[in-house]
Amino acid sequence: MSMGSLMYGAARMVIEFDDRTLAHVQLVLCAKLRRGEAFFFSWKDAPSIGGGRSSVWIDRSIPLFFRFSSATRHVINHEWLETLTLTANSAQGMMLIEEPSGTGTPPAGIPASAHHMQSNVGTGSLGHPHKRSTMPTGAARST
């Protein structure tokens, strides 16, 4: 499983997701931010870090950086994308959920080539995100 990361905020807190999940998260977060919408983004933590739940506030003023571990492109699962978007539009904010069955299958009548991400994303299946570290504000870490 290829693990990418979402670096959040000026402190560059690193949150790891498998690349396939990160590709879908990126699409939803960026669509909401383009519309100027702020919201919570929540996920279940990996059992290795306690198995709880974490949330971050997503807003245009907070820097986000997406790093994918592979250049492989994913077929986007539009059912999953739509479900993630619906959760993002709820009062509780976006909750990362498991990918529905039919993984990566484009809707009928639309060629699979039309559903590939245009950014660099890798392969993997849904895994639990890991918060790797929190750097002090202003500190930089090479990645």
Image: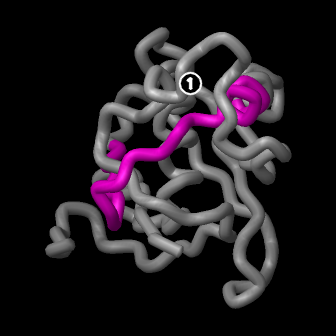
Q: How are the colours assigned in the image? A: one colour
Which stretch did the figure color magenta?
Answer: 64-84
Q: Say which residue appears at 80% left-offset and 72% top-offset.
A: 52
Q: Is residue 66 magenta?
A: yes
Answer whether residue 11 is visible to the viewer in this image: no
What residue is disc 1 on?
38
Q: Which residue occupies the extreme bottom position in the image?
A: 48
Along the line of sight, the residue nearer the viewer: 108 or 32:
108
Residue 15 image position (x, y, % from top left): 49, 65
Residue 25 image position (x, y, % from top left): 55, 42
Q: Say which residue appears at 48% left-offset and 45% top-offset.
A: 74
Residue 20 image position (x, y, % from top left): 54, 53
Which quadrant would residue 106 be assigned to in this image?
A: top right
Along the line of sight, the residue nearer the viewer: 133 or 114:
114
Residue 22 image position (x, y, % from top left): 51, 51
Answer whether residue 130 is visible to the viewer in this image: yes
Q: Is residue 74 magenta?
A: yes
- Vertical comparison of 42 with 62: above or below: below
